[in-house]
Image: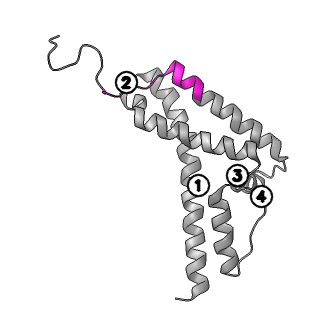
Amino acid sequence: MSEELLFLLAADAVLLLHALFVAFVLFSQVLIIIGGWRHWRWVRNRRFRLLHLLAIGIVVIQAWLGRICPLTTWEMALRSRAGDSVYSGSFVVHWVETVLYYDLPAWVFVVCYTGFAALVALSWVRVPPRRSSGKAPGNGPDEQG
């Protein structure tokens, strides 16, 4: 296997990882909202919710600082090493432009990321995670129903 092909495969793996990260952030929020309405216990898992909050928090901080995601930078470096074409700007901007044909300024994405983070924060109030113990009141081993 050639070195160029290895770099392309690595770049595609980073692209897949990036897409999975985006999917995690978006679909987790959808499931949290639905799960709160349907009373799904797992959407109140504190670790899951902290991971979700951290993920969108990183995105928002990078956007406000005007930074490109490290995954995008890593993917582009790998593609460049393979002699493949690279895109400029962020992963999300590139794919929104490619798939949806929207050519939007960067500030629009900052506003969207910030708004989405506000929705995530609101879900902490409307569908709060369980306490760290994971026990619901009245369900302890010493308590009989």
Mark 2–mark 3 distance (CA, rounded to whole Å): 34 Å
Disc 1: CA contacts within 10 A as few (<14), some (14-19) or many (>=20): few
Disc 1 from disc 2: Cα separation: 31 Å
Residue shown at 43%/23% (left/top)? 38
Choose top left, top right, bottom left or bottom right for residue 8.
Answer: bottom right
Residue to which mark 3 is pinned: 92
Q: Position of residue 80 (x, y in %)?
A: 70, 76
Horizontal side, residue 28 vs residue 108: left or right:
left
Pointer 1 and pointer 2: residues touching (CB < 8 Å)? no
| Residue 19 lies in the magenta-colored region | no
Q: Which residues are magenta?
A: 121-134
Please determine whether, in this image, residue 63 is positioned above or below residue 128: below
**Could you say which quadrant of the image residue 9 lies in?**
bottom right
> Label 3 is placed on what type of residue?
Val
* Residue where numbered disc 4 is placed: 89
Residue 118 position in % (x across, y down): 65, 28
Q: Which residue is mark 1?
A: 19
Q: CA distance from mark 3 to mark 1?
A: 9 Å
**Mark 4–mark 2 CB contact (< 8 Å):** no
